[in-house]
Amino acid sequence: MSTSTTAAREPSCRVRALHTADTVTVYQAYAPALGLPAARDGRFPAAWKRDRMTWIKPSFLWMMYRCGWATKADQETVLAVEITRAGFDLALGRACLSHYVPGLHPDRAAWQRALRRAPARVQWDPERDLHLRPLPHRSLQLGLSGALARAYADEWTVAVRDVTPLARKVRALVRAGDDRAARELLPDERPYPAPEAALARLR
């Protein structure tokens, strides 16, 4: 089956992630002063701001697009953060779309009220290919604030890995024209069995 055919059949909004029976892996990028201690200790340091909204991304390639293959300022360290599926599902269940969708929300005012109350937000941004070009289907970005951000940092996190070397290796292969070898290094991001009741409000 061709890549274009596969892309055409991919649902517009579906969570795809590297996951196990108990955990799901998300990506973030930080300055080395924060990212390296997090990877070394397997948890976020005290300097990680727990009172801010933090955005987690299950798509490795979307993270590469966002951080420019770990070259953008303050995004030079890419972390793969393995968190509990229970925490991830809880956040999805308490999330609100970050934008108004007629038909999904009764009206704009109802959406704004829901957004103010929600401790989590969801955006669906175009997924990216190896060359960071947009694909027809979209990738989940999940924003966490308040108690959910603190739980992410201090309760849900199972492991933190520095995957900056992987980012650089994949980029080098793409630049050398070896897409096949680059693709073989990508995390195995499969459809994630997110709670359907939560997704029905977020697509």
Image: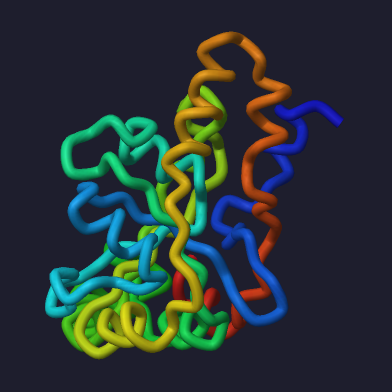
Q: Position of residue 32 (x, y in %)?
A: 23, 48
Q: Relative to the observer, which residue lies in front, 70 or 46? A: 46
Q: Position of residue 63 (x, y in %)?
A: 41, 45
Furthest residue to the top? Answer: 176
Q: How is the image coloured?
A: rainbow
Question: Relative to 190, is 103 on the left or the right?
Answer: left
Q: Position of residue 190 (x, y in %)?
A: 70, 57
Give the answer, above or below, for where 195 lies relative to 39: below
What is the total number of numbered labels drawn onto the structure image?
0
Q: Relative to the observer, which residue lies in front, 135 or 51? A: 51
Give the answer, above or below, for where 165 lies relative to 140: above
In the picture, residue 74 is in which quadrant?
top left
**Residue depicted at x 37% and y 48%:** 78
Q: Position of residue 84 (x, y in %)?
A: 53, 81
Question: Relative to 48, is 96 on the left or the right?
Answer: right
Question: Relative to 32, is 190 on the left or the right?
Answer: right
Give the answer, above or below, for where 109 lies relative to 59: below
Furthest residue to the front? Answer: 40
Q: Quadrant location of the N terminus?
A: top right
**Residue depicted at x 31% and y 38%:** 67
Question: Relative to 84, is 98 on the left or the right?
Answer: left
Furthest residue to the right? Answer: 1
In the picture, residue 122 is in which quadrant?
bottom left
Q: Relative to the observer, which residue lies in front, 11 or 128? A: 128
**Residue depicted at x 63% and y 40%:** 186
**Residue depicted at x 23% and y 33%:** 72
In the picture, residue 152 is in which quadrant?
bottom left
